[in-house]
Image (spheres, rainbow, N blue to C red):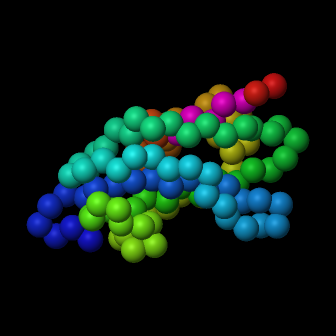
Amino acid sequence: MDVLSKSDPQIVLYMKNHEDVWKETGRTEKVSNDLNPVFMQPIQIVYKFEERQDIRIRVFDLDDPGQSIGMADFLGELELPVGQVKILFGELDLSVVKVKRKPYKIVSHS
């Protein structure tokens, strides 16, 4: 973890599959030296009304160029069902759930 500088955060989105295993769905870009990053790399997933879909959002601090997520410092995570967010907000904009500003949107394709 950065001691003398600000974090270099990157968000990784995971979805739980039918075998209850978390699979990486996408990730944002790394934002260097920023405690309040705005991520420009959106990740879209298909919302399936008839299924329960759980997502996990993890935040990592990547200090070195080319550093793998496995070697990065873990900063935090959030787990939630997509359906709950879809019902309340229509789209998942993480600025609403107060994790980070606009890294992901979940779009329904009906």
Give the residue at the far bottom of this rendering: 71
User: Which of the 4 quarters of the picture holds residue 21?
Assistant: bottom right
Q: Residue at x 66, y 61 (%)?
A: 23
Q: Residue at x 72, y 30 (%)?
A: 108
Q: Residue at x 44, y 66 (%)?
A: 69
Nearer the observer, 107 or 78: 107
Quarter of the picture holding the N terminus: bottom left
Give the residue at the far left of this rendering: 4
User: Residue 49: horizontal and vertical position, in percent?
Assistant: 83, 38
User: Residue 9: horizontal and vertical position, in percent?
Assistant: 34, 55
Nearer the observer, 78 or 63: 63
In this view of the protein, can residue 8 be seen by the observer? yes
Q: Which residues are magenta?
A: 104-108
User: Which of the 4 quarters of the picture holds residue 47?
Assistant: top right
User: Which of the 4 quarters of the picture holds residue 59?
Assistant: bottom left
Quarter of the picture holding the C terminus: top right
User: Residue 42: horizontal and vertical position, in percent?
Assistant: 50, 36
Compared to residue 28, the image places residue 86 above or below, namely above
Q: Residue at x 61, y 58 (%)?
A: 24
- Give the side of residue 46 with respect to residue 89, left or right: right
In this view of the protein, can residue 80 be seen by the observer? no
Main SS of residues in magenta: loop
